[in-house]
Amino acid sequence: MLKEIVVNAAPHETRVAVLENGTIAELFIERGDETNITGNIYKGRVQRVLPGMQAAFVDIGLNQAAFLYVDDVLDNTSDELARRFEQESEMGMEMDMDAGASQDQVEQNLQESELITSTNWEPCSSTHECSIEDLISEGQEILVQVAKSPIGTKGPRVTTHISLPGRFMVLMPTVDHIGISKRIDNDRERSRLREMLISIRDDKFGYILRTAAEGIHKERLAREMAFLNKTWDDIQKKSRTVSAPSLIYRDLTVTFRAVRDILTDEADRLIIDSRKGYENVLEFLEKLMPDLNVSVELYTGTEPVFDAYNIEGDIARALKKKVWLKSGGYIIIEQTEALVAIDVNTGRYVGKHNFEETILKTNLEAVKEIAYQIRLRNIGGIIIIDFIDMKKNHHKDKVMSQLTEVLKKDKSQTNVLPLSDLGLIQMTRKRVRKNLTRTLCEPCFYCGGDGMLLSGKSICHKIYRELINEATDIMGNRFTVKVHPLIAQLFHGEEKQLIESLEKRFGTPIAIYPEPHYHMEEYHIFESLS
Protein backbone atom coordinates (compact mmCIF):
# COMPACT_ATOMS: atom_id res chain seq x y z
CA MET A 1 0.00 0.00 0.00
CA LEU A 2 1.33 3.42 -0.99
CA LYS A 3 1.11 5.71 2.02
CA GLU A 4 1.80 9.44 1.80
CA ILE A 5 1.57 12.42 4.14
CA VAL A 6 0.41 15.73 2.67
CA VAL A 7 0.90 18.84 4.82
CA ASN A 8 -0.82 22.17 4.21
CA ALA A 9 1.10 24.57 6.48
CA ALA A 10 -0.49 28.02 6.66
CA PRO A 11 0.67 30.62 9.22
CA HIS A 12 -2.36 30.09 11.47
CA GLU A 13 -3.44 26.54 10.67
CA THR A 14 -1.68 23.30 9.81
CA ARG A 15 -3.53 20.39 8.22
CA VAL A 16 -1.96 16.95 7.84
CA ALA A 17 -3.63 14.38 5.60
CA VAL A 18 -2.59 10.73 5.51
CA LEU A 19 -3.23 9.21 2.08
CA GLU A 20 -3.49 5.50 1.36
CA ASN A 21 -3.23 4.67 -2.34
CA GLY A 22 -4.15 8.28 -3.13
CA THR A 23 -7.25 8.40 -0.89
CA ILE A 24 -7.36 10.36 2.35
CA ALA A 25 -7.55 8.04 5.37
CA GLU A 26 -6.87 10.38 8.29
CA LEU A 27 -6.83 14.14 8.85
CA PHE A 28 -5.19 16.10 11.66
CA ILE A 29 -5.73 19.83 12.19
CA GLU A 30 -3.80 22.17 14.48
CA ARG A 31 -4.64 25.84 14.99
CA GLY A 32 -2.50 26.80 17.95
CA ASP A 33 -5.41 26.76 20.42
CA GLU A 34 -6.39 24.29 23.13
CA THR A 35 -8.32 21.90 20.88
CA ASN A 36 -5.57 19.27 20.95
CA ILE A 37 -3.32 19.36 23.99
CA THR A 38 -2.98 15.61 24.41
CA GLY A 39 0.55 14.65 25.36
CA ASN A 40 1.30 18.00 27.03
CA ILE A 41 2.60 17.85 30.59
CA TYR A 42 1.43 20.34 33.23
CA LYS A 43 2.14 21.12 36.82
CA GLY A 44 -1.37 21.31 38.21
CA ARG A 45 -3.09 21.94 41.49
CA VAL A 46 -5.79 19.65 42.86
CA GLN A 47 -9.02 21.66 43.12
CA ARG A 48 -11.49 19.09 44.42
CA VAL A 49 -11.29 15.48 45.51
CA LEU A 50 -14.47 13.48 44.90
CA PRO A 51 -14.45 10.28 47.00
CA GLY A 52 -17.84 9.23 45.63
CA MET A 53 -16.45 9.20 42.09
CA GLN A 54 -12.92 8.12 43.08
CA ALA A 55 -11.64 11.05 41.03
CA ALA A 56 -10.42 14.62 41.34
CA PHE A 57 -10.49 17.88 39.42
CA VAL A 58 -7.09 19.42 38.69
CA ASP A 59 -6.41 23.02 37.64
CA ILE A 60 -3.82 22.96 34.84
CA GLY A 61 -4.37 26.55 33.71
CA LEU A 62 -7.12 25.99 31.14
CA ASN A 63 -10.71 27.18 31.06
CA GLN A 64 -11.90 23.74 32.11
CA ALA A 65 -10.54 21.75 35.04
CA ALA A 66 -8.90 18.45 34.18
CA PHE A 67 -10.33 15.14 35.36
CA LEU A 68 -8.03 12.70 37.21
CA TYR A 69 -9.29 9.18 37.95
CA VAL A 70 -7.92 7.10 40.83
CA ASP A 71 -6.28 4.55 38.49
CA ASP A 72 -4.30 7.40 36.93
CA VAL A 73 -2.85 8.62 40.23
CA LEU A 74 0.74 7.63 40.86
CA ASP A 75 1.76 6.05 44.11
CA ASN A 76 3.92 2.97 44.76
CA THR A 77 1.75 0.84 42.47
CA SER A 78 3.95 0.58 39.41
CA ASP A 79 3.95 -3.22 39.51
CA GLU A 80 0.17 -3.28 39.67
CA LEU A 81 -0.01 -0.78 36.82
CA ALA A 82 2.33 -2.91 34.72
CA ARG A 83 0.14 -5.94 35.36
CA ARG A 84 -2.89 -3.92 34.27
CA PHE A 85 -1.07 -2.93 31.05
CA GLU A 86 -0.34 -6.58 30.38
CA GLN A 87 -3.88 -7.74 31.10
CA GLU A 88 -5.44 -5.08 28.90
CA SER A 89 -2.98 -5.88 26.15
CA GLU A 90 -3.86 -9.57 26.26
CA MET A 91 -7.60 -8.83 26.36
CA GLY A 92 -7.34 -6.39 23.48
CA MET A 93 -8.83 -3.62 25.64
CA GLU A 94 -7.96 0.01 25.09
CA MET A 95 -6.07 2.08 27.60
CA ASP A 96 -6.66 5.73 28.46
CA MET A 97 -3.22 6.94 27.38
CA ASP A 98 -3.99 8.24 23.91
CA ALA A 99 -2.54 11.54 22.68
CA GLY A 100 -3.27 12.80 19.20
CA ALA A 101 -1.16 11.24 16.49
CA SER A 102 1.82 10.62 18.76
CA GLN A 103 -0.05 9.16 21.72
CA ASP A 104 -2.18 7.01 19.38
CA GLN A 105 1.07 5.26 18.49
CA VAL A 106 2.08 5.08 22.15
CA GLU A 107 -1.18 3.38 22.99
CA GLN A 108 -0.90 1.02 20.06
CA ASN A 109 2.51 -0.09 21.27
CA LEU A 110 1.21 -0.48 24.82
CA GLN A 111 -1.67 -2.60 23.58
CA GLU A 112 0.58 -4.72 21.38
CA SER A 113 3.48 -5.10 23.79
CA GLU A 114 4.61 -8.18 25.65
CA LEU A 115 5.38 -6.77 29.07
CA ILE A 116 8.04 -8.05 31.47
CA THR A 117 7.63 -6.65 34.98
CA SER A 118 9.88 -6.64 38.01
CA THR A 119 8.67 -6.11 41.55
CA ASN A 120 10.60 -3.69 43.75
CA TRP A 121 7.98 -3.01 46.44
CA GLU A 122 4.67 -4.15 47.86
CA PRO A 123 1.91 -2.21 46.04
CA CYS A 124 -1.77 -1.99 46.87
CA SER A 125 -3.38 -5.36 46.23
CA SER A 126 -5.60 -3.56 43.74
CA THR A 127 -5.59 0.03 42.56
CA HIS A 128 -9.35 0.06 42.99
CA GLU A 129 -8.89 -0.61 46.73
CA CYS A 130 -6.87 2.61 47.10
CA SER A 131 -9.11 5.57 47.85
CA ILE A 132 -8.50 8.78 45.94
CA GLU A 133 -8.35 10.80 49.18
CA ASP A 134 -5.49 8.57 50.41
CA LEU A 135 -3.42 9.43 47.34
CA ILE A 136 -3.95 13.16 46.82
CA SER A 137 -5.45 16.10 48.68
CA GLU A 138 -6.99 19.43 47.74
CA GLY A 139 -4.40 22.13 47.12
CA GLN A 140 -1.65 19.60 46.34
CA GLU A 141 0.61 20.34 43.36
CA ILE A 142 0.93 17.43 40.97
CA LEU A 143 2.64 16.66 37.64
CA VAL A 144 0.17 15.33 35.07
CA GLN A 145 0.03 14.52 31.36
CA VAL A 146 -3.06 15.09 29.23
CA ALA A 147 -4.46 11.72 28.12
CA LYS A 148 -7.58 13.13 26.44
CA SER A 149 -8.05 16.61 25.05
CA PRO A 150 -11.21 18.57 25.94
CA ILE A 151 -14.20 17.29 23.97
CA GLY A 152 -17.40 19.34 23.93
CA THR A 153 -18.35 20.29 27.49
CA LYS A 154 -15.93 17.75 28.97
CA GLY A 155 -12.59 18.95 30.24
CA PRO A 156 -9.33 17.14 29.55
CA ARG A 157 -8.50 13.85 31.22
CA VAL A 158 -5.06 13.63 32.80
CA THR A 159 -2.80 10.98 34.25
CA THR A 160 0.27 11.01 36.48
CA HIS A 161 1.74 8.11 34.50
CA ILE A 162 3.95 10.06 32.09
CA SER A 163 4.93 8.64 28.67
CA LEU A 164 7.48 10.19 26.30
CA PRO A 165 7.50 8.63 22.80
CA GLY A 166 10.55 8.56 20.59
CA ARG A 167 11.13 6.99 17.21
CA PHE A 168 12.29 3.60 18.51
CA MET A 169 10.96 3.50 22.05
CA VAL A 170 8.54 4.98 24.54
CA LEU A 171 9.86 6.07 27.93
CA MET A 172 7.49 5.53 30.87
CA PRO A 173 9.41 6.78 33.93
CA THR A 174 6.66 5.88 36.43
CA VAL A 175 6.46 2.16 35.55
CA ASP A 176 9.24 -0.41 35.90
CA HIS A 177 8.80 -2.80 32.97
CA ILE A 178 10.09 -3.61 29.50
CA GLY A 179 7.84 -4.12 26.47
CA ILE A 180 8.39 -5.24 22.89
CA SER A 181 5.91 -4.44 20.12
CA LYS A 182 4.08 -7.57 19.02
CA ARG A 183 4.46 -6.40 15.44
CA ILE A 184 8.03 -7.65 15.81
CA ASP A 185 7.16 -11.33 15.52
CA ASN A 186 10.64 -12.87 15.09
CA ASP A 187 11.47 -14.58 18.39
CA ARG A 188 15.23 -14.25 17.91
CA GLU A 189 14.91 -10.51 17.20
CA ARG A 190 12.63 -10.02 20.19
CA SER A 191 15.16 -11.74 22.45
CA ARG A 192 18.00 -9.66 21.00
CA LEU A 193 16.12 -6.42 21.56
CA ARG A 194 15.10 -7.40 25.09
CA GLU A 195 18.65 -8.30 26.10
CA MET A 196 20.02 -5.15 24.45
CA LEU A 197 17.54 -2.92 26.26
CA ILE A 198 18.23 -4.56 29.63
CA SER A 199 21.99 -4.17 29.12
CA ILE A 200 21.83 -0.42 28.49
CA ARG A 201 19.12 0.42 31.03
CA ASP A 202 20.72 1.87 34.15
CA ASP A 203 17.52 2.97 35.87
CA LYS A 204 14.13 1.58 36.84
CA PHE A 205 12.24 3.41 34.12
CA GLY A 206 9.87 1.55 31.85
CA TYR A 207 10.55 1.25 28.13
CA ILE A 208 8.51 -0.05 25.23
CA LEU A 209 10.35 -0.79 22.01
CA ARG A 210 8.34 0.23 18.95
CA THR A 211 8.15 -1.57 15.64
CA ALA A 212 10.77 0.77 14.17
CA ALA A 213 13.33 -0.67 16.60
CA GLU A 214 13.53 -3.93 14.65
CA GLY A 215 17.13 -4.41 13.50
CA ILE A 216 18.42 -1.41 15.45
CA HIS A 217 22.01 -1.24 16.72
CA LYS A 218 22.81 -0.86 20.40
CA GLU A 219 24.47 2.55 20.00
CA ARG A 220 21.44 4.07 18.24
CA LEU A 221 19.07 2.72 20.88
CA ALA A 222 21.31 4.04 23.66
CA ARG A 223 21.35 7.52 22.08
CA GLU A 224 17.56 7.69 21.98
CA MET A 225 17.30 6.38 25.54
CA ALA A 226 19.70 9.11 26.68
CA PHE A 227 17.69 11.73 24.76
CA LEU A 228 14.38 10.66 26.33
CA ASN A 229 15.93 10.45 29.79
CA LYS A 230 17.35 13.96 29.43
CA THR A 231 13.93 15.19 28.33
CA TRP A 232 12.43 13.69 31.47
CA ASP A 233 15.16 15.24 33.62
CA ASP A 234 14.45 18.65 32.06
CA ILE A 235 10.73 18.20 32.76
CA GLN A 236 11.41 17.41 36.41
CA LYS A 237 13.82 20.34 36.81
CA LYS A 238 11.36 22.78 35.28
CA SER A 239 8.51 21.47 37.42
CA ARG A 240 10.53 22.31 40.54
CA THR A 241 11.08 25.91 39.48
CA VAL A 242 7.54 26.95 38.48
CA SER A 243 4.30 27.25 40.41
CA ALA A 244 1.05 25.53 39.51
CA PRO A 245 -0.74 25.74 37.19
CA SER A 246 1.96 25.80 34.49
CA LEU A 247 2.70 24.14 31.17
CA ILE A 248 5.89 22.10 31.65
CA TYR A 249 6.24 20.27 28.34
CA ARG A 250 4.50 20.73 25.00
CA ASP A 251 4.25 17.77 22.65
CA LEU A 252 5.51 18.10 19.09
CA THR A 253 3.50 20.00 16.50
CA VAL A 254 1.15 18.00 14.32
CA THR A 255 3.68 18.00 11.46
CA PHE A 256 6.53 16.63 13.57
CA ARG A 257 4.22 14.08 15.18
CA ALA A 258 3.33 12.85 11.71
CA VAL A 259 7.03 12.61 10.86
CA ARG A 260 7.87 10.75 14.06
CA ASP A 261 4.91 8.38 14.22
CA ILE A 262 3.82 7.80 10.62
CA LEU A 263 6.66 8.73 8.26
CA THR A 264 9.23 6.72 10.20
CA ASP A 265 7.31 3.43 10.14
CA GLU A 266 4.59 3.49 7.52
CA ALA A 267 4.57 6.30 4.97
CA ASP A 268 6.68 6.39 1.81
CA ARG A 269 7.00 10.17 1.50
CA LEU A 270 5.91 13.51 2.89
CA ILE A 271 4.80 16.49 0.77
CA ILE A 272 4.62 19.94 2.37
CA ASP A 273 3.69 23.29 0.80
CA SER A 274 5.71 25.55 3.12
CA ARG A 275 9.41 26.15 2.49
CA LYS A 276 10.00 26.99 6.14
CA GLY A 277 8.10 23.89 7.19
CA TYR A 278 10.04 21.83 4.67
CA GLU A 279 13.36 23.05 6.04
CA ASN A 280 12.19 22.44 9.62
CA VAL A 281 11.24 18.85 8.76
CA LEU A 282 14.64 18.22 7.18
CA GLU A 283 16.36 19.71 10.23
CA PHE A 284 14.18 17.58 12.52
CA LEU A 285 15.08 14.43 10.58
CA GLU A 286 18.78 15.29 10.49
CA LYS A 287 18.86 15.95 14.21
CA LEU A 288 16.80 13.05 15.52
CA MET A 289 16.61 10.51 12.68
CA PRO A 290 19.72 10.94 10.49
CA ASP A 291 19.60 7.35 9.24
CA LEU A 292 15.97 7.49 8.10
CA ASN A 293 15.70 6.99 4.35
CA VAL A 294 12.43 8.70 3.37
CA SER A 295 11.34 11.18 0.73
CA VAL A 296 10.46 14.71 1.87
CA GLU A 297 9.27 16.99 -0.94
CA LEU A 298 8.49 20.70 -1.11
CA TYR A 299 5.28 21.30 -3.05
CA THR A 300 5.69 24.25 -5.42
CA GLY A 301 2.60 23.91 -7.64
CA THR A 302 0.32 26.88 -8.30
CA GLU A 303 -2.77 24.93 -7.24
CA PRO A 304 -3.28 24.56 -3.45
CA VAL A 305 -1.72 21.29 -2.33
CA PHE A 306 -4.95 19.84 -0.89
CA ASP A 307 -6.70 20.59 -4.19
CA ALA A 308 -3.86 19.03 -6.16
CA TYR A 309 -4.31 15.79 -4.22
CA ASN A 310 -8.15 15.94 -4.30
CA ILE A 311 -8.34 16.22 -0.53
CA GLU A 312 -10.65 19.23 -0.11
CA GLY A 313 -13.58 17.41 -1.71
CA ASP A 314 -13.12 14.39 0.54
CA ILE A 315 -13.08 16.62 3.61
CA ALA A 316 -16.28 18.34 2.50
CA ARG A 317 -18.00 14.96 1.96
CA ALA A 318 -16.82 13.79 5.38
CA LEU A 319 -18.88 16.58 6.98
CA LYS A 320 -22.15 15.43 5.39
CA LYS A 321 -24.65 13.08 6.99
CA LYS A 322 -25.43 11.12 3.83
CA VAL A 323 -22.71 9.14 2.08
CA TRP A 324 -23.56 7.46 -1.22
CA LEU A 325 -22.31 3.98 -2.08
CA LYS A 326 -21.17 3.05 -5.57
CA SER A 327 -24.08 0.64 -6.01
CA GLY A 328 -26.65 3.38 -5.40
CA GLY A 329 -27.23 2.62 -1.74
CA TYR A 330 -26.21 5.03 1.00
CA ILE A 331 -25.45 5.37 4.70
CA ILE A 332 -26.64 8.07 7.10
CA ILE A 333 -24.31 9.12 9.92
CA GLU A 334 -26.00 10.87 12.85
CA GLN A 335 -23.82 12.10 15.71
CA THR A 336 -25.20 12.78 19.19
CA GLU A 337 -23.55 13.64 22.49
CA ALA A 338 -23.69 10.05 23.74
CA LEU A 339 -23.35 7.94 20.61
CA VAL A 340 -23.19 7.83 16.82
CA ALA A 341 -25.91 6.06 14.81
CA ILE A 342 -25.18 4.77 11.30
CA ASP A 343 -28.08 3.64 9.13
CA VAL A 344 -27.65 1.57 5.94
CA ASN A 345 -30.18 1.91 3.09
CA THR A 346 -30.51 0.35 -0.37
CA GLY A 347 -31.38 3.73 -1.92
CA ARG A 348 -31.46 3.53 -5.71
CA TYR A 349 -29.93 0.04 -5.81
CA VAL A 350 -32.46 -2.60 -6.89
CA GLY A 351 -30.07 -5.48 -7.61
CA LYS A 352 -29.99 -7.99 -10.45
CA HIS A 353 -31.09 -11.23 -8.80
CA ASN A 354 -33.12 -11.69 -5.62
CA PHE A 355 -33.88 -9.38 -2.73
CA GLU A 356 -31.62 -11.20 -0.23
CA GLU A 357 -28.60 -10.86 -2.53
CA THR A 358 -29.36 -7.16 -3.00
CA ILE A 359 -29.42 -6.65 0.77
CA LEU A 360 -26.20 -8.61 1.28
CA LYS A 361 -24.31 -6.68 -1.40
CA THR A 362 -25.48 -3.34 0.00
CA ASN A 363 -24.50 -4.30 3.56
CA LEU A 364 -21.06 -5.56 2.46
CA GLU A 365 -20.41 -2.39 0.49
CA ALA A 366 -21.58 -0.34 3.47
CA VAL A 367 -19.16 -2.17 5.79
CA LYS A 368 -16.12 -0.86 3.89
CA GLU A 369 -17.50 2.67 3.70
CA ILE A 370 -18.46 2.71 7.38
CA ALA A 371 -14.97 1.63 8.47
CA TYR A 372 -13.46 4.27 6.19
CA GLN A 373 -15.75 7.07 7.43
CA ILE A 374 -15.26 6.18 11.09
CA ARG A 375 -11.51 6.49 10.70
CA LEU A 376 -11.56 9.61 8.51
CA ARG A 377 -14.07 11.44 10.70
CA ASN A 378 -12.34 10.16 13.86
CA ILE A 379 -15.64 8.98 15.29
CA GLY A 380 -15.29 7.61 18.81
CA GLY A 381 -17.33 6.40 21.74
CA ILE A 382 -20.41 4.20 21.26
CA ILE A 383 -21.36 3.47 17.63
CA ILE A 384 -24.61 1.77 16.63
CA ILE A 385 -24.83 0.40 13.07
CA ASP A 386 -28.26 -0.47 11.67
CA PHE A 387 -27.68 -2.80 8.73
CA ILE A 388 -30.50 -3.76 6.40
CA ASP A 389 -32.23 -6.75 7.96
CA MET A 390 -30.86 -10.10 6.74
CA LYS A 391 -32.74 -13.38 7.06
CA LYS A 392 -29.94 -15.86 6.38
CA ASN A 393 -27.45 -16.55 9.15
CA HIS A 394 -24.51 -17.08 6.79
CA HIS A 395 -25.16 -13.61 5.33
CA LYS A 396 -25.03 -12.14 8.84
CA ASP A 397 -21.80 -14.01 9.54
CA LYS A 398 -20.29 -12.69 6.31
CA VAL A 399 -21.08 -9.07 7.20
CA MET A 400 -19.70 -9.48 10.74
CA SER A 401 -16.53 -11.14 9.45
CA GLN A 402 -15.88 -8.39 6.91
CA LEU A 403 -16.50 -5.63 9.46
CA THR A 404 -14.01 -7.21 11.85
CA GLU A 405 -11.46 -7.51 9.05
CA VAL A 406 -11.67 -3.93 7.75
CA LEU A 407 -11.45 -2.49 11.26
CA LYS A 408 -8.00 -4.04 11.66
CA LYS A 409 -6.57 -1.11 9.67
CA ASP A 410 -7.69 1.29 12.37
CA LYS A 411 -5.02 2.12 14.97
CA SER A 412 -7.62 3.21 17.51
CA GLN A 413 -8.84 0.20 19.44
CA THR A 414 -12.35 -1.00 18.56
CA ASN A 415 -14.61 -3.50 20.27
CA VAL A 416 -17.44 -5.02 18.20
CA LEU A 417 -20.35 -6.95 19.72
CA PRO A 418 -22.27 -9.64 17.78
CA LEU A 419 -25.17 -8.70 15.52
CA SER A 420 -28.33 -8.40 17.60
CA ASP A 421 -31.73 -9.89 16.80
CA LEU A 422 -32.81 -6.45 15.62
CA GLY A 423 -30.01 -6.34 13.04
CA LEU A 424 -27.94 -3.83 15.04
CA ILE A 425 -24.21 -3.92 15.66
CA GLN A 426 -22.91 -2.18 18.76
CA MET A 427 -19.26 -1.18 18.83
CA THR A 428 -16.94 1.20 20.63
CA ARG A 429 -13.94 3.12 19.39
CA LYS A 430 -11.44 5.01 21.51
CA ARG A 431 -12.22 8.73 21.65
CA VAL A 432 -9.35 11.02 22.71
CA ARG A 433 -9.83 14.17 20.63
CA LYS A 434 -12.58 15.96 18.77
CA ASN A 435 -13.95 14.28 15.70
CA LEU A 436 -13.76 16.03 12.34
CA THR A 437 -17.25 17.52 12.59
CA ARG A 438 -16.62 19.02 16.04
CA THR A 439 -13.24 20.35 14.89
CA LEU A 440 -14.46 22.12 11.74
CA CYS A 441 -18.10 22.86 12.61
CA GLU A 442 -20.25 24.37 15.33
CA PRO A 443 -23.96 23.98 16.17
CA CYS A 444 -26.14 25.75 13.62
CA PHE A 445 -28.06 28.74 14.98
CA TYR A 446 -30.23 28.78 11.84
CA CYS A 447 -31.91 25.49 12.73
CA GLY A 448 -31.61 25.45 16.50
CA GLY A 449 -28.83 22.91 16.57
CA ASP A 450 -30.48 20.25 14.44
CA GLY A 451 -27.72 20.50 11.84
CA MET A 452 -24.14 21.70 11.49
CA LEU A 453 -22.35 24.41 9.55
CA LEU A 454 -18.74 25.47 9.19
CA SER A 455 -17.47 27.42 12.18
CA GLY A 456 -16.60 31.09 11.79
CA LYS A 457 -12.89 30.28 12.04
CA SER A 458 -13.20 27.57 9.39
CA ILE A 459 -14.99 29.99 7.05
CA CYS A 460 -12.27 32.59 7.62
CA HIS A 461 -9.55 30.05 6.85
CA LYS A 462 -11.50 28.85 3.80
CA ILE A 463 -11.71 32.44 2.48
CA TYR A 464 -8.01 32.86 3.31
CA ARG A 465 -7.10 29.86 1.18
CA GLU A 466 -9.35 30.98 -1.68
CA LEU A 467 -7.80 34.46 -1.63
CA ILE A 468 -4.36 32.86 -1.95
CA ASN A 469 -5.64 30.86 -4.91
CA GLU A 470 -7.31 33.92 -6.48
CA ALA A 471 -4.20 36.06 -5.98
CA THR A 472 -2.32 34.06 -8.61
CA ASP A 473 -4.58 35.60 -11.28
CA ILE A 474 -4.95 39.14 -9.94
CA MET A 475 -6.32 41.52 -12.57
CA GLY A 476 -7.06 44.49 -10.33
CA ASN A 477 -5.14 46.16 -7.54
CA ARG A 478 -7.39 45.26 -4.59
CA PHE A 479 -9.77 42.62 -3.29
CA THR A 480 -13.23 43.14 -1.85
CA VAL A 481 -14.77 40.32 0.16
CA LYS A 482 -18.47 40.38 1.08
CA VAL A 483 -19.34 38.11 3.99
CA HIS A 484 -21.89 37.55 6.73
CA PRO A 485 -21.57 40.22 9.50
CA LEU A 486 -20.24 37.69 12.02
CA ILE A 487 -17.48 36.64 9.62
CA ALA A 488 -16.67 40.30 8.98
CA GLN A 489 -16.44 40.78 12.74
CA LEU A 490 -13.97 37.90 12.99
CA PHE A 491 -11.85 39.30 10.15
CA HIS A 492 -11.75 42.70 11.85
CA GLY A 493 -11.00 41.19 15.25
CA GLU A 494 -9.87 37.71 16.23
CA GLU A 495 -8.82 36.66 12.72
CA LYS A 496 -7.41 40.04 11.69
CA GLN A 497 -3.95 38.55 11.23
CA LEU A 498 -5.19 36.46 8.29
CA ILE A 499 -6.03 39.53 6.22
CA GLU A 500 -2.95 41.42 7.36
CA SER A 501 -0.68 38.54 6.35
CA LEU A 502 -2.30 38.38 2.89
CA GLU A 503 -2.01 42.14 2.34
CA LYS A 504 1.66 41.98 3.32
CA ARG A 505 2.25 38.91 1.17
CA PHE A 506 0.69 40.27 -2.03
CA GLY A 507 0.98 44.02 -1.48
CA THR A 508 -2.74 44.26 -2.24
CA PRO A 509 -5.38 45.84 0.04
CA ILE A 510 -8.28 43.59 1.04
CA ALA A 511 -11.58 45.15 2.08
CA ILE A 512 -14.08 43.16 4.16
CA TYR A 513 -17.74 44.20 3.86
CA PRO A 514 -20.59 42.73 5.96
CA GLU A 515 -23.79 41.74 4.16
CA PRO A 516 -26.65 41.23 6.67
CA HIS A 517 -28.72 39.12 4.26
CA TYR A 518 -25.90 36.62 3.61
CA HIS A 519 -26.00 33.09 4.96
CA MET A 520 -23.23 32.36 7.49
CA GLU A 521 -21.21 30.36 4.95
CA GLU A 522 -21.91 32.64 1.99
CA TYR A 523 -19.21 34.95 0.68
CA HIS A 524 -18.14 36.58 -2.56
CA ILE A 525 -14.71 37.80 -3.65
CA PHE A 526 -14.39 40.70 -6.08
CA GLU A 527 -11.39 42.27 -7.80
CA SER A 528 -11.35 45.98 -8.55
CA LEU A 529 -9.00 48.57 -10.05
CA SER A 530 -9.56 51.16 -7.34
Image: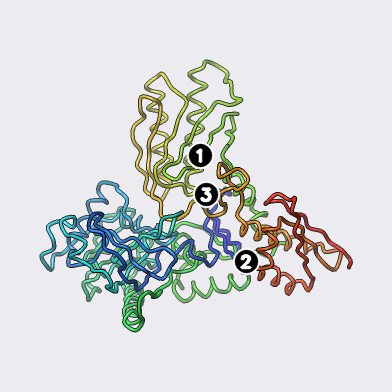
Mark 1 or mark 3, which is nearer the start of the sequence? 3
Left or right, residue 261 beside residue 207: right
Amino acid type, mark 2: Ala
| Residue labelled with disc 1 | 334
Residue 386 lies left or right of residue 76; in this view the side is right
Label 2: element kind? strand
Q: Earlier in the sequence, mark 3 or mark 2?
A: 2
Q: Given this view, does label 3 or label 1 mark the residue nearer the observer?
A: 1
Three-letter amino acid code at the position of disc 3: Ala
Q: Which residue occupies 44% across, 34% down?
A: 385
Residue in view at x 58 percent, y 61 percent = 7
Q: Which residue is mark 3?
A: 25
Between tags 1 and 2, which lies in front? Answer: 1
The percent position of residue 321, horizontal first and vertical second, equals 56, 39
Tell me the tag on residue 16: none
Q: Horizontal placement of 261 versus 187: left or right? A: right
Q: Which mark is residue 10?
A: 2
Picture residue at 18% right of the left edge, 58% below the top: 127
Q: Is residue 58 above or below residue 232?
A: above
Apparent side of residue 402 relative to residue 330 in the rendered image (left or right)? left
Categorize mark 3 by other alpha carbons within 10 Å: few (<14), some (14-19), many (20+). many
Q: Secondary structure at mark 1?
A: strand
Q: Is residue 192 visible?
A: no
Q: Are marks 3 and 1 in contact (CB under 8 Å)?
A: no
Q: N-terminal of the two: label 1 or label 2?
A: 2
Q: Residue at x 80, y 64 (%)?
A: 479
* Residue type beneath disc 1: Glu
Q: Nearer the viewer, residue 151 or 24?
A: 151
Mark 1 closeness class: few <14, some 14–19, many ≥20 residues within 10 Å: some
Q: Position of residue 76 (x, y in %)?
A: 17, 67
* Residue 237 in view in this figure: yes
- In three-dimensional space, the C-alpha distance between marks 3 and 1, rounded to whole angstroms, equals 20 Å
